[in-house]
Amino acid sequence: MQMPTNYFIYTLILLYLSCQGVASNDQKYPVYIVQAGWHTGIVLQTVDIPLKIFKEAQPYTQYKYLDVSWGEEKYYQIPEPGIFVSMSTVLWPTRAVVSMSPYSREIKTYYRQPTIIKINMTEKRYFALCRFLSNAFQKDKRGNVIPSTFFRDSSGFFLAKRKYSMFRTCNTWVALALKKSGFDISPFMLVTSKQLFRRLEKMDHTHYLIK
């Protein structure tokens, strides 16, 4: 019995659409872990950010990248902190801030002598990461982020929920963000960037852009 031509074409269309669906589910979202100087942050491509989940990124969508990082409020914002500020950040828990720094230059040339690992994330993990980042901020009763007032104009720095301490650094925070995104990485006893990158090397779907 000969199959009707219309039925055959309809079947081909269904097969094509189902393949397209599988391809879209396999989409990978690039995320970059960048360490430069004392700075370790998470860098996202703004075009990928789901603003319904991470609405705090909305003001920066005209840029190509958004560097989101976490650190001690005073140490992070003073160009040369000095010994007193440095000691105060490790002797007892202090206020932390989330920094959002947008830029459009190529990621390899934006930082000075960086170490950069690229992670290709599934949609589920990427959205979980964006949810973690959104939840990292302190927010007012209207759900808006609260700018740091350490300087009169602390542009790009916002109060964070967690406090900074000797055993809870920006590197610990990055590892926690990835753990909450579904990766097999532990933030326990992770303080330095060297410890962080050793654990990143063991994760799946990661490779160095600059080592």
Image (tube, rainbow, N blue to C red):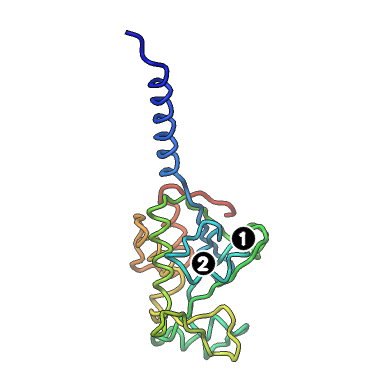
Amino acid type of the residue that numbered disc 2 sits on in the rendered structure: Gly
Reading the image, the residue beneath label 2 is: 41
Report which quarter residue 39 is drawn in: bottom right
Amino acid type of the residue that numbered disc 1 sits on in the rendered structure: Lys
At label 1, counting other C-alpha atoms closer than 10 Å, the crowd grade (few under 14, some 14-19, many 20 or more) is some
Task: Report, in whole angstroms, how far the alpha carbon at label 2 lies from the one at label 1.
Answer: 16 Å
Q: Is residue 63 above or below residue 204?
A: below
Which element carries disc 1, helix, strand or loop? loop
Q: Does label 2 or label 1 sit earlier along the sequence?
A: 2
**Residue appearing at x 54%, y 51% in the figure:** 208
**Residue appearing at x 38%, y 53% in the figure:** 124
Reading the image, the residue beneath label 1 is: 64
Residue 137 locus on image (x, y percent) = 43, 77
**Residue appearing at x 64%, y 66% in the figure:** 103
Report which quarter residue 196 is drawn in: bottom left
Q: Is residue 39 left or right of residue 196?
A: right
| Residue 28 tag number | none
Residue 60 locus on image (x, y percent) = 58, 68
At label 2, counting other C-alpha atoms closer than 10 Å, the crowd grade (few under 14, some 14-19, many 20 or more) is many
Q: Is residue 26 above or below residue 110?
A: above
Which element carries disc 2, helix, strand or loop? strand
- In front: 195, or 162? 162
Q: Residue furthest top?
A: 1
Residue 105 locus on image (x, y percent) = 67, 61
Give the tally of numbered discs. 2
Residue 80 locus on image (x, y percent) = 62, 84
Q: Nearer the viewer, mark 2 or mark 1?
A: 1
Q: Is residue 141 left or right of residue 111?
A: left
